[in-house]
Amino acid sequence: MNLSKPIKHLIKNMALRPFDFPIPDYPLPPYPISTELCDIICGFGRGSAELGIPTANVPIEQLPAEINDLDLGVYFGFAKINKVDKSVLMVDRNDGRQVQYNFGKFLSAKNGDLDTLPVVLSIGKNPFYDNKFKTVELHVLHKFSHDFYGAKLKFNILGYIRPELDYTTKEALINDINIDIEITKKVLSYEGYAKYKDILNA
Ligand code: RBF
Ligand code: MG
C-alpha cells in the first residue's frame, strides 16, 4: 500500500480543517489498540441532553495502558456492546440526579444494536466544559432506541483525527463533532480499516 497518499484526499465535499491529521491507508502503530470488555458508566449527562450527541463513557482504569499515553483528542474505531444480565437499578449521578441503569436490557439484535458498530471517540478533559479529569467517551454511529448504562462494551482504536480543542460556543463544538463523524464513516469504509470490524467480532 502507498503510504505517501493519505486517504483523506479521497474525502470529497468536506472541508478539511487545519488541525486535522493526515490519516494513513491502514492503522499504523500504536494502532490498532484493542480493549477488553469494559463497563458503560454515566458521564455528566450532557452529551445527549445538551449536545444531542450521546456518548458511552468508560472507566479509564479498565482500559489498556497504551490508551493513557495517547494525546487528548478525537479517534475512530469499532465497538461492540454486550448486555449484562441484571435488573434495572437507579444510580446517583455526581450532580445529584438519578439515572437508570438498564444494563442494555432494551437493546435489540434485530435493530443491529449488538453488531460491531463504527465509533468516534473523545479522549479528553472537555475544555469547553472545564472538566477536572480525563474521560474516555464513545459516540456510536447507530440509531439506538434506548440508552444502555450498565451494559458492557469492547472496542478498538484505529486512528487519530484531531487534537482536543476549546470552543467559544456549543454550536462550534457540535459542528466539529459532526465533521468528526463524517470523517469516521468515510475512513472506516476503506478496506484497510473495515477489516478490523471482523477482528472485533471474532
Ligand atoms: N469537548 C471539548 O471540550 N473539546 C473537543 O474538541 C471535543 N471533541 C469531541 C469530539 C467527539 C467526537 C465527541 C463525541 C466529544 C467531544 N467533546 C469535546 C466532548 C464533549 O464535550 C462531551 O462529549 C460532552 O460534554 C458530554 O460529556
Ligand atoms: Mg456520555
Image (cartoon, rainbow, N blue to C red):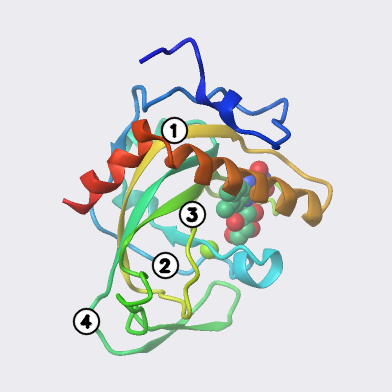
Closer to the camera in the image, 163 or 94: 163
| The furthest residue to the right | 168
Residue 87: image x %, image y %? 28, 89
Percent of width and height locating residue 116:
32, 57
3D distance between C-alphas at marks 2 and 3: 10 Å
Q: Which residue is mark 2?
A: 41
Q: Nearer the viewer, mark 1 or mark 3?
A: 1
Mark 2 vs mark 1: give the one in front: 1
Task: State the residue position of label 3.
Answer: 137
Q: Quadrant of the N terminus?
A: top left
**C-beta proximity under 8 Å, tags 1 and 3:** no
Q: Disc 3 beta carbon < 8 A from ligand 2?
A: yes
Apparent side of residue 38 relative to residue 57 in the rendered image (left or right): left
Which residue in the structure is indicated by mark 4? 85
How far apart marks 2 and 1 lie (CA) works out to: 24 Å
Q: Residues within 10 Å of mark 2 (few under 14, many from 20)?
A: many
